[in-house]
Image (cartoon, rainbow, N blue to C red):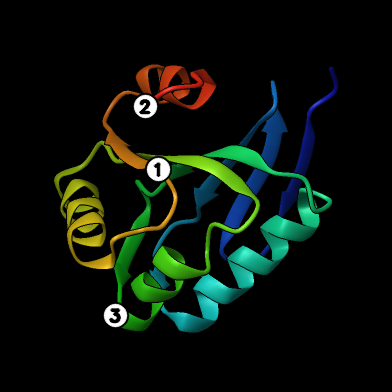
């Protein structure tokens, strides 16, 4: 199966093996405008089809409340589950804070290992 690729000002997107890979670019601050743009572009890239999403936040610089809230409540339309990949202390802190306070509506887990995240995304159970 051919991979599809796309990028915008804030992130790289690709679909491979029925999983959307969403990688935040260097030094992006996830505020409301960034969250809304990433979500809109991702949904268009997916052609209105639901997928699991591997969300790599290793290069994310920071977030604000409006960006976290948007992602938690609106940012995951057309997703079946989300695996957040955070390998740095900063990324893990941001991801844990997001899960604790944002309470995302889609099954979401944090991983430091992309392969384990992919297994979670490919599984049919939590």
The first of marks 3 and 1 along the sequence is 3
Name the residue at 58% across, 56% down.
11
Q: CA distance from mark 3 to mark 1?
A: 20 Å
Q: CA distance from mark 1 to mark 2?
A: 8 Å
Q: Nearer the viewer, mark 3 or mark 1?
A: 1
- In the shown orientation, is residue 8 left or right of residue 26? right
Q: Position of residue 33 (x, y in %)?
A: 53, 82
Q: Look at the numbered disc 1 and give the secondary structure of its residue.
A: loop
Q: Position of residue 37 (x, y in %)?
A: 62, 73
Residue wearing tag 1: 107
Name the residue at 50% across, 55% down.
25
Q: Is residue 112 visible?
A: yes
Residue wearing tag 3: 65
Do the CB atoms of the residues marked 3 and 1 lie less than 8 Å apart?
no
Looking at the rendered structure, which numbered label has been put on residue 126?
A: 2
| Quarter where residue 27 is shown | bottom left
The first of marks 1 and 2 along the sequence is 1
Name the residue at 35% across, 70% down.
68
Q: Residues within 10 Å of mark 2 (few under 14, many from 20)?
A: few
Q: Position of residue 52 (x, y in %)?
A: 57, 36
- In the shown orientation, is residue 26 left or right of residue 41? left
The first of marks 2 and 3 along the sequence is 3
Do the CB atoms of the residues marked 1 and 2 lie less than 8 Å apart?
yes
Query: Residue extending furthest front?
Result: 125
| Quarter where residue 111 is shown | top left
Q: Look at the numbered disc 3 and give the secondary structure of its residue.
A: helix
Do the CB atoms of the residues marked 2 and 3 lie less than 8 Å apart?
no
Q: Residues within 10 Å of mark 3 (few under 14, many from 20)?
A: some
Looking at the rendered structure, which numbered label has been put on residue 5?
A: none
């Amino acid at each position: 199966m051919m991979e599809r690729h796309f990028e915008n000002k804030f992130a790289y997107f690709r679909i491979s093996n029925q999983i959307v890979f969403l990688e935040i670019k260097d030094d992006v601050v996830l505020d409301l405008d960034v969250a809304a743009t990433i979500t809109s572009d991702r949904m268009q890239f997916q052609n209105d089809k639901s997928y699991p999403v591997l969300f790599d936040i290793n290069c994310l610089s920071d977030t604000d409340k409006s960006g976290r809230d948007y992602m938690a409540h609106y940012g995951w339309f057309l997703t079946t589950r989300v695996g957040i990949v955070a390998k740095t202390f900063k990324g893990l802190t941001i991801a844990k804070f997001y899960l604790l306070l944002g309470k995302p509506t889609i099954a979401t887990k944090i991983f430091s290992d992309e392969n384990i995240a992919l297994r979670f995304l490919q599984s049919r159970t939590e």
